[in-house]
Amino acid sequence: SPPREPLRTTGYTKQADGSSSNYANQVVLAMAAGLVVILVMLSWANDPVLPSGVSSPSSSLASAGALRSSGNARSASSSQPEKTVLRIYHDSKICKGTNYTSYETTLVSSHIASSGNNNIDDETGYYKLSIPEGVDDNDPQPGKSMKIFGPGEVRLYNGQNDYVATVVELEGCTPMFKWPPIRSGRLMHRDTDPGKICQVDPEVQKKFATTKDIAKPHTRIVYSAESSDYFGYQTYTNAFAFLNSSQTDASWLRLLTCEVSDDLSKSFPTFAAPRSLYSKRYGPINKPDIIEKWFKSECDAPHPDDTIVVIDPDNFLMRDLAKWTSQVSRKNALGQAAYYVGMPLVQQLWKEVCEMGCDDQVDAVGVPYVVKASDLAEIAPLWRMYAMKIKELVQTDQKFKDTYERALNIMWAAEMYAYNFACAHLSIKTKVVRDMQARDVDRSIPLDDPDPPAMIHMGRAWFPKQHAAAAEPWRHTEGEDFLDDGFRAVQVFCKCNQTASTIIPWPVPSHGLDWQSYHTLRLMHDGLAHFGPVPVNTEFRHEPPQGYYWTKN
């Protein structure tokens, strides 16, 4: 017989069969719930493994490395939930209250044959369901939210039936807004813990590692990206720079936000996880989101004693990071000074949004972040939470926005402040350094400087006045505020230009350019020469310039 649609129930409202929930039923349910709580508490006394959907008072995250190092942790399959539940709350943006609708399923998409059932999506094998329109924070009506319980997921689609994002259990409560507009969902269960599915090809990883044993504690250099052409050439350059920077006992990994592993995953070590719905409101949320999902992977997560260096895709390594990685330990991290370092307003902002550690000093750092894996596992969910909290306050509280946006640029940099605030929340001290990277717009460094930083944070490149004639074929009009009569007389490159992946100034003069411009152009040219052109296709990236930023959701 064809598979039935998901069981649909509601919380203290009219049931799917038309009957009403009465007082007697509520009493019986409450008594049963009380008995379950007693039994669960008794079981916890002898078994520290928490049931699915229940968070530990200290932290709901445990890294795969922590499970691996214990030696006797029970297999997740022994307590694998037998169903996945989606709960949609109709008058709460924080997944509270009794006015909700629940959908649950026990069937796995791979087990469902196409049968002509209108409730089954033939392409994915998932159950189809309608999703109510979200509510903006400044609307007078109550908010809406959704939450997944169990190992499955709900894939979300817009009115044109285009896939937008996926909601999974570890994300907790997902607020539902009018943007992005979601109209339908596909709900599925999993009979295998997704954290047990290995993504990173060990043979590919070996090609991007200087450590002898990837499973043992070492330095992991990671960054977050999407599949677009914009990130494609940066991946090539970033990987090439790693291979030529003489790292000590290190590995390199791309963390990809995408519903599936993309074509570059076959050539570059990659961990991929589905997009958070909130990333369509604020793209930088991808960074803490993918890092949190990486730590939940029993197969691919780092060892808890690893040292993690979180960079951006446009951070190009130039020298060994051992000088900086050797300075970190548990609860003692390190990072490059942020543009807002020393501004008292940052501490004021922290006191306004803090939930713990409100009296702790905020260490104002940006990438690169150098931190122990066991600390980053705790930082990641708080990093994500504070970023969303800041963004929504900007959207709903005009006084808050007026106080902080002009001076701190919190609308775009919310995730930077959120990382700092997550560290303060956990009382993790971060040493502020100023010599780990140089931005393109920082003070020009002479090309022959004997002690340059460890990496470039790329953005633009310039030719000096003496080479102005040679620069003419690539002259840019953007960025005129950065021009001077020295190293930066003519701008020839900007990653903001939609031809940045295909028009890279070359050859360049061997002298006269500053350190940042010369090595930015050299590494991009040599990276593409080494790996070949970035593939263009309709699935993962589109052809520039029109498709420069397009990415697969």
Image: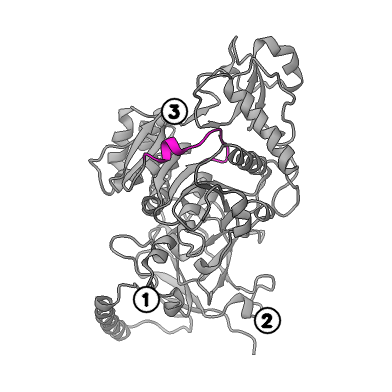
Q: Nearer the viewer, mark 3 or mark 2?
A: 3
> Visible in this render: residue 63?
no
Mark 1 vs 2: CB contact within 8 A: no
Secondary structure of residue under mark 2: loop
Secondary structure of residue under mark 1: loop
Residue 336, horizontal then vertical, whole percent: 42, 33
Residue lying farthest to the front in this orientation: 212
Which portion, as a residue range, is magenta? 312-327
Residue 225, horizontal then vertical, whole percent: 58, 47
Q: Nearer the viewer, mark 1 or mark 2?
A: 2
Residue lying farthest to the bottom in this orientation: 1
Q: Residue at x 35, y 69 (%)?
A: 54
Q: Which residue is mark 1?
A: 12
Q: CA distance from mark 3 to mark 2?
A: 58 Å
Q: Earlier in the sequence, mark 3 or mark 1?
A: 1
Q: Nearer the viewer, residue 162 or 431?
A: 431
Q: Which residue is mark 3?
A: 435
Q: Earlier in the sequence, mark 1 or mark 2?
A: 1
Q: CA distance from mark 3 to mark 1?
A: 59 Å
Q: Quadrant of the N terminus?
A: bottom right
Which residue type does callout 2 highlight? Answer: Ala
Q: Which residue is mark 2?
A: 113
Left or right: 335 in relation to 523: left
Left or right: 41 in relation to 174: left
Residue 169 is drawn in which quadrant? bottom left
Residue 515, horizontal then vertical, whole percent: 58, 22
246 is higher (above) or lower (below) than 85: above
Q: Quadrant of the C terminus?
A: bottom right
Q: Residue at x 44, y 28 (%)?
A: 435
Which residue type does callout 3 highlight? Answer: Asp
